[in-house]
Image (tube, helix red, strand yellow):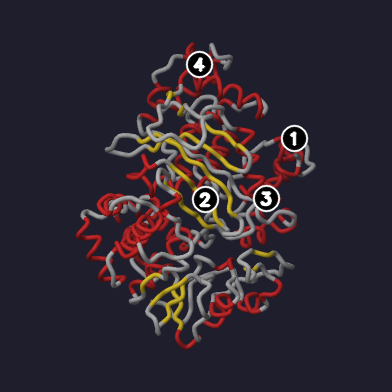
């Protein structure tokens, strides 16, 4: 447990105390934006955490958790319950740390709904990357050696930096994630207890019940009666699952939705009104793929995205929810990013980095989009899906009827010939590149999954004839949610910076972009948007 000083960076105590100049949640539950001040790097102190909690400051949601010694309950800093006395509060860098310290989660603010995190310091970045992998694959067995290998360190070093960042070991963190997911499923769905246990990664219902009793002091079934205000009424979800995934405001939903709408492939995805819809295939190692539908809408008063999805995804919920978080960039800290970008982001601090639902799909679409407009690329992708996509008969009919196809798998595309693709109006060189990408992905030589290594992916992509640095960086930026991509020789970026399309212009752009590290991908989004 860490109760004296938290390893939370990029915020100073005075900026919290002067909350009137910051973003805050008003008494009616709506987030308001007031004049912004500059934040200076400094560790959070108990006094600073307490002031953030008193202000219900949404910027710190998920950054720390508050344990109340008089009730043995821990909360998010935005919790609307009666504010406890400072002497009764302890502050923890993670939900797992609070639970290891003997606190159980608040049923009103529901710590499992807190947003994720992004970090820039080297050790913190590695620890948080590992934490995201644990969260994304919480239903899988935790192999610490493999996890450490994926983030590029030894398992011993991972244990050390993980403990420094979160106050617990990776195993303890994973155990808490399973419990919180089970708590969420018991609260927000009508799944039976057995399905909840296995979907959350427990080996048996008995094991889940035992841990609930040890950690929380009650049986999981209590949550079907005793739920917080944020829970979804089971009368409202007889056929579908609905979850709320929170984010730190501000969030520019309009821009990210417009970005996806311009690139949406008919029959696979669509934007209608203020919501995004999608046919999604979940690839599961050692299991049959699951393909069904999802719908995403913004709930600005809750600072959350409402995700409605087919119950067909019951056994893959952690993976689906993790993918949605990545695509809509819910881990981002807009204050930290906009401070790094300075004047570039001053007019839109809520701009996010659109991700991809499937890395292979994004790679194919990027190849199709080379040297053509966004509209032309969308036309080619539409033809490609119509010819080689998979028609889906949805077992659970969605609340819409405009989607019926899934993007073809790497295995399917790898079996195609150049003529199969070229006859769609796609030039032969691009058709060959698409087939090569598919063959590498199908053979495991190209990893574009959520936990892939960016550097290795970029190198593997550029071994494909026809895939250059720009395309490789763009794929990494979106498919791998790489926050520091800066695609070279991007004409739009050079135009936005008013630089010539030449080697000298690129050198000057690279020099300017150094100041935006490690958030250059967000700088790219701002520069592209400035031309619209």
**Closer mark to the observer between disc 2 and disc 4:** 2
Q: What residue would you read off at disc 1?
A: 501
Secondary structure at badge 3 equals: helix
Q: What residue would you read off at disc 2?
A: 306
Secondary structure at badge 4 equals: helix
Q: Residue at x 63, y 64 (%)?
A: 30
Q: Residues within 10 Å of mark 2 (few under 14, many from 20)?
A: some
Q: Earlier in the sequence, mark 2 or mark 1?
A: 2
How far is mark 2 from mark 4, CA to CA?
37 Å
Q: Residues within 10 Å of mark 4 (few under 14, many from 20)?
A: many
Between 370 and 361, the one nearer to me in the picture: 361
Q: Earlier in the sequence, mark 4 or mark 3?
A: 4
Between 237 and 157, the one nearer to me in the picture: 237
Task: State the image coordinates of residue 351 (x, y, percent, origin top left).
Answer: 65, 51
Q: Looking at the rendering, which quadrant does residue 392 occupy? A: top left
Height in image: 271 above or below 190? above
Q: Which mark is residue 513?
A: 3
How far is mark 2 from mark 1, CA to CA?
42 Å
How far is mark 3 from mark 2, CA to CA?
35 Å
Secondary structure at badge 1 equals: loop
Q: Residues within 10 Å of mark 1 (few under 14, many from 20)?
A: some
């Amino acid at each position: 447990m860490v109760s004296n000083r938290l390893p939370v960076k990029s915020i100073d105590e005075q900026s919290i105390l002067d909350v009137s100049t910051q973003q805050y949640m008003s008494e009616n539950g709506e987030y308001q934006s007031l004049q912004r001040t500059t934040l200076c790097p400094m560790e959070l102190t108990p006094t600073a955490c307490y002031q953030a909690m008193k202000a219900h400051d949404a910027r710190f949601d998920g950054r720390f958790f508050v344990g109340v010694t008089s009730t043995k309950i821990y909360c998010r800093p935005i919790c609307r319950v009666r504010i406890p006395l400072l002497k009764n509060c302890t502050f923890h860098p993670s939900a797992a740390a609070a639970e290891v310290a003997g606190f159980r989660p608040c049923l009103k603010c529901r710590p499992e709904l807190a947003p994720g995190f992004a970090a820039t310091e080297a050790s913190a970045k590695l620890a948080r990357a590992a934490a995201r992998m644990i969260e994304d694959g919480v239903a899988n067995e935790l192999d610490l050696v493999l996890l450490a290998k994926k983030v590029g360190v030894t398992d011993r070093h991972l244990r050390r930096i993980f403990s420094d960042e979160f106050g617990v070991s990776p195993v303890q963190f994973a155990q808490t994630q399973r419990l919180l997911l089970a708590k969420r499923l018991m609260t927000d769905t009508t799944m039976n207890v057995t399905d909840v246990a296995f979907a959350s990664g427990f080996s048996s219902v008995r094991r889940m019940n035992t841990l609930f009793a040890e950690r929380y002091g009650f049986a999981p079934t209590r949550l079907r009666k005793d739920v917080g205000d944020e829970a979804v009424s089971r009368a409202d979800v007889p056929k579908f699952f609905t979850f709320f995934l929170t984010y730190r405001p501000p969030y520019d939903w309009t821009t990210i939705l417009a970005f996806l709408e311009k690139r949406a492939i008919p029959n696979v995805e669509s934007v209608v009104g203020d919501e995004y819809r999608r046919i999604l295939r979940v690839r599961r190692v050692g299991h049959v793929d699951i393909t069904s539908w999802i719908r995403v809408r913004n709930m600005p008063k809750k600072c959350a995205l409402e995700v409605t999805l087919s119950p067909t995804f019951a056994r893959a919920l952690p993976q689906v929810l993790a993918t949605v978080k990545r695509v809509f960039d819910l881990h981002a800290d807009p204050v930290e990013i906009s401070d790094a970008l300075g004047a570039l982001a001053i007019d839109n601090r809520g701009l996010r980095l659109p991700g991809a639902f499937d890395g292979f799909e994004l790679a194919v679409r990027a190849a199709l989009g080379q040297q053509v407009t966004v509209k032309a690329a969308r036309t080619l992708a539409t033809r490609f899906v119509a010819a080689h996509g998979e028609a889906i008969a949805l077992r659970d009919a969605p609340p819409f009827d405009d989607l019926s196809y899934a993007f073809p798998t790497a295995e399917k595309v790898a079996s195609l010939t150049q003529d199969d693709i070229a006859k769609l109006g796609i030039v032969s060189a691009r058709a060959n590149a698409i087939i090569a990408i598919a063959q590498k992905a199908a053979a495991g030589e190209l990893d574009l999954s959520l936990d892939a290594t960016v550097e290795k992916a970029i190198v593997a992509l550029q071994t494909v004839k026809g895939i250059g640095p720009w395309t490789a960086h763009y794929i990494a930026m979106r498919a791998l949610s790489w926050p520091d991509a800066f695609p070279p020789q991007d004409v739009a970026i050079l135009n936005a910076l008013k630089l010539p399309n030449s080697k000298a212009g690129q050198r000057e752009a690279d020099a300017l972009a150094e100041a935006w590290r490690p958030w250059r991908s967000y700088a790219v989004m701002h520069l592209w948007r400035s031309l619209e």
